[in-house]
Amino acid sequence: MSTITQTVTTEERPPTMRLKESDLRTTLRPVAFVTLVAGVVGLFLAELMIGAVSIPLADILALLMGKEAAESSWSIILYELRLPRAIMALAGGAALGAAGLQLQTLFRNPLAGPWALGITAGAQLGVALVVVAGAVVGSTFLERFAFLDNLSLVAGAGLGSALVLMAIAAVSRRVSTITLLIMGLMLGFLAQGLVSLVLHFTNETQGKIFASWNDGSFAGVHWEHFPIILPMIVVGVICALLLVKPLNALLLGERYAATLGLSVDRARMMALTSAVLLAAPITAYCGPILFVGLIVPHISRGVFNTSDHRILMPAVLLVGACLGLGADLFVHLPWERHFLHLNAVNALIGAPIVIWVILRNKHMRSLAV
């Protein structure tokens, strides 16, 4: 109610007042970027300091510089638990934010994201198949193969995401972006149905393994995983930054972008590949992280008041990092009981924003059966 009222009030303002307000927000963009950078640094240090055992900032800085802390156990807590989790929350939030922005621009749909294209569901199906395979052949068989022992769930998630990408890529040159989005949704629903079917034939223990992964968490990532995760994210971010001009052109429509000399098919394929490089490793190692890829682009547009990807792309990286760190910090605060999950916190933040986006969008408000 208040959002609609505010929107009406904004529309009734004189044009000169709206122009001055827009100029003010444009002038304050450098301040917003500096604030976001400070927020990322502050939340990252808070992740390292706060938990069941509090570690003073001076000792955190001493440990990071290779010096000794007042308590020897703090080094283990920092390097084995909190630092990998904080790095993953930062990188994961930034990667999912960049993936969401590309998908929303590519499909010209404010509700597009890794889940809407079936990438997340494909990863879930791959993990479910690995869990059932473990139940059929037994853990003793799997332990004979080191690569399966270490990468079984990750390989399953990666394979599921890759198969969905191949299906999308196979038809992306022959259908419109709207049709492609609908196909992504249907592939996601198909994968969800297959997940339920596959889990029906597994045992309770294997089902719990899948349920634990399916909750989504940055805490399951360890140092040995980063040589796989970080290069994929770095390549995906570089591709996303190189695509800012093509994405700006696609905002005008594919036909108009083509008249400007843009190779639309190549831009679409690059954006899809970049989005999968950013979203697939996060889903593989952390489970399905919901809402981040969807809401971060909307928060960034609201803060910076622009659709220009030259500004939005670095903005979503910073906002995504802040959201990933903030949500993970909230989950791991020294609560008396730990019933909170990362996706529950993301849903508490993301669901109101999605409702706001739908109510704010005139086209979506006017849709009727």
Image (spheres, helix red, strand yellow):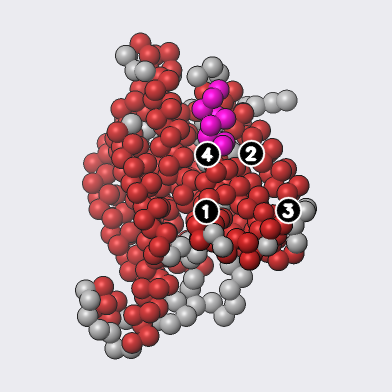
Secondary structure state at the residue bearing disc 3: helix
Q: Quadrant of the C terminus?
A: top right
The residue that label 3 is drawn on is 199
Q: From the viewer's perspective, is the residue at label 4 or at label 2 nearer?
A: 4
Q: Residue 145 location, x and y as percent?
A: 54, 59
Highlighted range, magenta: 162-171
What kind of residue is marked 4? Ala
Q: Give the alpha-carbon distance from disc 2 to disc 1, as whole Å.
A: 19 Å
42, 179: nearer the viewer: 179
Q: Nearer the viewer, residue 1 or 281?
A: 281
Q: Amino acid at mark 2?
A: Gly
The residue to which callout 4 is attached is 162
Whole-angstrom CA distance, mark 4 to mark 2, is: 13 Å
Residue 188 is marked as 2
Q: Residue at x 54, y 25 (%)?
A: 170
The alpha-carbon separation of the residues under discs 4 and 1 comes to: 12 Å
Camera-near label (2 vs 1) is 1
> How far, Cα to Cα, is label 3 from label 2?
17 Å
Q: Secondary structure at mark 4?
A: helix
- In this view of the protein, can residue 66 be seen by the observer? yes
Most common secondary structure along the magenta stretch: helix
Residue at (28, 84) in percent of width and height: 69
**Left or right of residue 124: residue 249:** left
User: In the image, which disc is placed on residue 154?
Assistant: 1
* Disc 1 crowd, CA 10 A, few/some/many (<14, 14-19, 20+): many
Dot 4: few (<14), some (14–19), or many (≥20) neighbours within 10 Å? some
Question: Which structural element holds mark 1?
Answer: helix
Residue 133 placement (x, y as % from top left): 67, 54
The amino acid sitting under disc 1 is Val
